[in-house]
Every structure is written in C-alpha cells, then in structure tokens.
Image (cartoon, coloured by chain):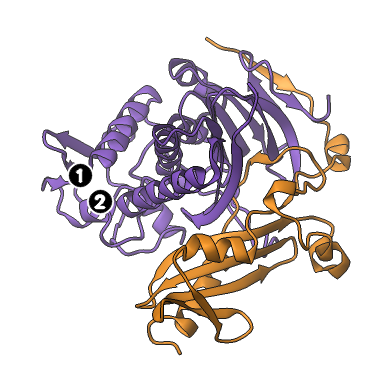
Amino acid sequence: MEKTADSIIRARPLLGTFVEITAWGAEGRHLERAVDGAFAVIERVHELMSYHEAHSDVSRLNRANAGVPVVIHEWTVAVLKASIDLQDRSKGLFDIAVGAALEHLGLLPSSHGASAHASAVGQSAVGLHPRNRARLLVPGNTIDLGGIAKGFAVDQAVAALRVSGVVGGVVNAGGDLFVFGPDEQVVAIRDPRNPARAMAHTKLREAALASTALSFDPVAPDRPSYCSVIDPRSGAPVATMSGATVRAPSCMIADALTKVIMIGGRDASEVLEHYGASGLFMTNNGDVLATADWEDVHTLAA
Amino acid sequence: MVEWVRLAVPAAIVASMGSPSHAIQYLTVEQSRTLSFPSATDFVAIDAQAWKVASDGKTVGRYIVDHVIGKHLYIDYAVTLDAGGRIQRVDILQYREAYGGEVRDRSWLNQFVGKSSASTLRVGADIRNISGATLSCHHLTEGIKRIVTRYGKDGR
C-alpha cells in the first residue's frame, strides 16, 4: 500500500514510561488530533487503574472494605474480567492481589495499608456485579493492575486511532506495543541481561508484543533493579528468570502473559495457546526458549 | 501442547552485537509550541527556557523547555502550563538513547541539531520499535515537578 498521506511520531511520558505513537494515513493536522486523543485515552486508563492515584478505581476498591461494592468504569470492569479469566486459565499464576507483596518490597507505596497477600493461590480477589460494580472478596487484600493495565491502555489507544481514521501505526508504551494497519514492522527485543543490546528481532502486523524484565533506568543505569513480578505461590519476586516476551492478538493479553511466563516458564505453554499467543523467555543462565509456533522470531546470533 | 524450542544466543556473540540505541527528534520547539498553543499570538521570554504565552493580549499559559541527561539518555521535553499554572501536556521533543558514553560527548549530541521527525535519524540499528525491559521515566517526572514548582501556580 502506497503511503500518500502524512506520517507522524510523537512521544509523551505516561504510565511511568515513555509512550510513543506512530500514525500515518491521514493529513498531518488530522493525525495530530488523533494522536492527541490516543494519548488522552492512555492518561484516562492511568487515572482509572493506577495504584498510586488516590481517586483511581483501583484505589477506591482497595480502600473499601471487603464485600462493599464500588461503582467502577466499564474499562476497569473489562480489565478485571480479563484478570479473573487469566488467573483461572493460568492456574493462579496470574494474580492481581500481589499489591501487598509489592508494597513490602518497596515497589508500591504503602498507601493502602495492605498487610499480606490474603487470598489463596487461584482464589479470585474481586467479584463483579451488574451495573459496573465490583468488590474485594477477601479482607486485607489489595489489588494492583500494574501487570495488565499498560497493555489495555495500548489497545484502547489503538482503538481510538482507528476510530479517528488513522490507517496504520504503532503504539509503544515502554516496550509494550501494538502494530496496526497493513504494514509489517520489525521489532527488536532487548537482552534482559543488558538492555542496551538487542537479543532478537521479530515482525508484527496487527499484533501486540510485550516484555517483562528487570526495570531499567537509562538515566541511572547503575541503580540496582529487581524483578517486580511476584510469584503468588511464594509471595516473593521471581528469581529464576531474566525476562519474557509475548506476542498476542491484544496487548493486554501479551502484557499479562509475560508475567505468567516469568513465573511458570515452560508450564505457560497451555495458557499461551489458549490466548493465541507465542512466547519466549530467558532464564538466569542465559538460555532462551521460544514456543515452536513463533516462526519469525530470530535471535541476533543466527 | 505447543513445544518450547531453544534459540541460540551464545553470550560471546550477544556481547559483540549492535545495540538497539536510537535517537529521534519528535518535534522542534517551534512545532511543539504551535501544537500546544494553536491560537497564540505572542511568546514572551521569561528566561532562557520559558515563555509566557498570550493570545490577543490575554495570557493563556506558559511553555517551558527542559532536558534530562544521564549516562545513556538525553531527552529534551516541553511542558505546557495553562493560565492557572496547571500541566496541560508534556511532549518529548528529542530522545537519544545511546551506549558507550556518547550522550556525554558534545560532538555526538551536535549531530542531531536541526534534525526533524521527517528525517528521523537512527543510530546503531534500522529498527525503531523496541520491546524489553521497561524504561523508567522517573527522572523526567522529577524534572516536570521542578518545572511546575518554578513556573506553575505558585511560581513566578
């Protein structure tokens, strides 16, 4: 397809990272407005699902006593629904009730006074009710959508761009990204042991890619970082995995499944298959394994 | 069930590979000012990095340009404040991620001067889309807070 129309690339600091949007297929000023709207959608998702923002749906749920229903936005309902399904399909490896463990590690502010991971492995932390109401099910529990909301924000931004008539582009929220439109894009995957370097390449078209690894601060690269993925079975951060990357039909699913691979490793293949996703992971000793159905992922050693 | 296949990533080869470091100018200061204040008629300098923005004699906000520099990262960004001193938007103007200490090297930085997003410059690789360890924008957030303190509601 010939690109006769303009193309723009814009970036803003959102969701605690750098969000970059590439859009093409319309006149320049139209693209600016569409991209502006897509950034606004991402900000809205952040406002609704942040653990830090006092007025977010997540904070309001966490402050409410267990059993008391709270009216939340339909987007939050959608993410909670997906979280429950992911927890079920992953036999408890995906769990949004790890907020307490993250607070103990200093990775989340101790604003909600969570004391422990109060629900059992595989036990749902939230109940959903008609008319966009939700409630926490277990006293002392808190939820954190940090493992899935960023992917959802990317999907919503892509949906907004499409509605605005943008033909193609990429929404990349700090490495969780979606390539939409008729063009294929090559994506590099950072080496989790050394984020300055690429480890592999793959091609994407109408698909999402998300990664999880140690957090990485390019301003202060020597700052110690550790894994923020919590194994709900132990309540401790994952220690055996360096990083995981997932390709999936939606960025929300890709984002969430990176956590399932970080925790479950090879055991994640069944849940990956269920969601039509492919994955790869690197263990601490540098072994890289990918699902056999992911044919166009190439390590740079090849 | 889908099988897992081992991919060859010998450590020695990984170590010698090119990095995904990249640099891009998203917006020039002029482009960014126009996008932030489409109806502005005047930009009056407050100091070397900040402007008071007026539209037909009425103050509509402030526009401030700043940068964050680290060992591997150099970012120019612009903060748009409304007439009440509240943040309207933050745009990244230039993003340069590099390894091997280039960011601290002035001649390396100078090569990006005047580049626009239409002539996107790529360093080290042709690939702009990168996934992997999530980059933190913690330092940028700190910079934005300083700007709001200095130029925002209670600032000058």
Residue A166 appears in the rendering: yes
Report the disc number at residue A138. 1
Identify the colour of chain A in the image: purple
Residue A34 x, y percent position in the rendering = 45, 43
Residue A122 x, y percent position in the rendering = 32, 31
Closer to viewer: mark 1 or mark 2:
2
Q: Residue at x 47, y 66 (%)?
A: B37
Q: Residues within 10 Å of mark 2 (few under 14, many from 20)?
A: many
The amino acid sitting under disc 2 is Asp
Residue A282 x, y percent position in the rendering = 66, 33
Seen in the picture, residue B114 relative to A90 is either above or below; the reply is: below
| Residue at the spot of label 2 | A57
What is the distance, in whole Å, between disc 1 and disc 2 at their CAs? 17 Å
Residue A299 x, y percent position in the rendering = 76, 28
Q: Of callouts 1 and 2, which one flags the residue occurring earlier in the amino acid sequence?
A: 2
Pick the front one: A272 or A140: A272
Q: Residue at x 48, y 23 (%)?
A: A249
Shown in orange, the chain is B
